[in-house]
Amino acid sequence: MLAFLAGAVFFLVLMTSIATEVHSADDPFEGNRFQGRYQWDFAKPWPALLNYGGYISLIGGGLTALVVLARPGLLVSAYGAFMTLIVLVGQAEVNAYMFTGSDFVRWRADDARAIAQLLAPVQAGDGVVVADQHYGSVSEFVFSLRAPQRLLVRPSGAHLTQADLPPDVTWVAAINDYVADFHYQYSLKFEHTSLYVLSQTTPLLHKPEKLVWQGTEPMRLNFAGGKDAKALTGFNSPEDWGIWSATDVATIALPQLVVGDITLRINVAALPENVQEPLRIQIGDAHAELSLKTEWLTYELRLAPTWPTDTIRLEMPVVRPVPRDSRSLGVGLSGIEISRP
């Protein structure tokens, strides 16, 4: 009996550890963070298994202990059933990881193949791949480029400067979100990767699609009612007044490239839950910060990017202020205007 009780305590502690690990793991492919971040990408059973497999095992262990306490004669059968449950749950979680992991690797490989086709023929060492690791799906990305490339490991969200890049590269492929603080001719956004073209001699990408804005007329984008919402990345669905950002970092694609002294007028508002956070704005290598109010205001900024760029980067932490609203909300944006000072 003492051996049974010791075994029961051991399995309960084990299952509690499993449940805690699965529930609170920091890795974005585990636990609640997995379901919260990727719930729109996968079939519903998989995130559920990843989240609740540990709890299923814990409940099974508890029921096993209760059954054996009530009927000691069922010790062998109860433990046999419990171990079968452990094997089934473990196999289901392995299948879930394989399912999600294979999809993630496929996304990386698809981006790499598209880049390889645009840059064909890709020469060894022409470019550099930036990622937050050098294994897993990043390895698949590098293999799918069809030619060996240099790999730069930086934390996601880091600023990439000219000093970080080898002097002879003609393109940069950034996996995850990075701040491009280096001179590039233009950029292309893929599903999960950003391609920055540094040299006009890159095959098939020798001519930018957008012209440099001359500044004779203001450049205006109005997001009320979704009028210019196609220019936005990282935002929720548009509303009558404008649109809320949906991620910590969101971008606006300008219809033309801007360079030199500009005046940016931006109509924005914050929520009470994140009004204390600054709104960071980046256009090329030009940076600015705004302290927002909860009411709608138009702010005017003087910026001077030193190279042509077509992207405005907005950074502000998102919150979930309404319990019944599943959306993440950051900065409210109604419209922008760019003009010469």
Image (cartoon, helix red, strand yellow):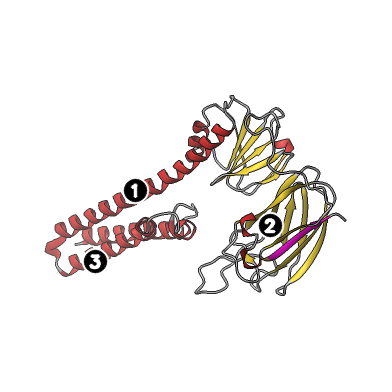
Q: Which residue bears the numbered disc 3?
A: 63
In magenta, the rendered stretch is 334-339
Judge left or right: residue 112 versus residue 209. Answer: left
Q: Residue at x 29, y 58 (%)?
A: 11
Q: Residue at x 60, y 69 (%)?
A: 239
The verdict on residue 128 being magenta is no
As drawn, the residue found furthest toward the right would be: 341
Residue 318 numbered mark, or none = none
Is disc 2 placed on a helix, strand or loop?
A: strand
Callout 2 amino acid? Leu
Residue 263 vs residue 222, the one in the foreground: 222
Front of the two marks 3 and 2: 2
Q: Residues within 10 Å of mark 3 (few under 14, many from 20)?
A: some
Residue 128 appears in the picture as rendered: yes
Dot 3 or dot 2: first in sequence order is 3
Is disc 1 placed on a helix, strand or loop?
A: helix
- Give the CA distance from mark 2 to mark 1: 38 Å
Residue 94 numbered mark, or none = 1
Q: Which residue bears the numbered disc 2?
A: 314
Residue 232 appears in the picture as rendered: no
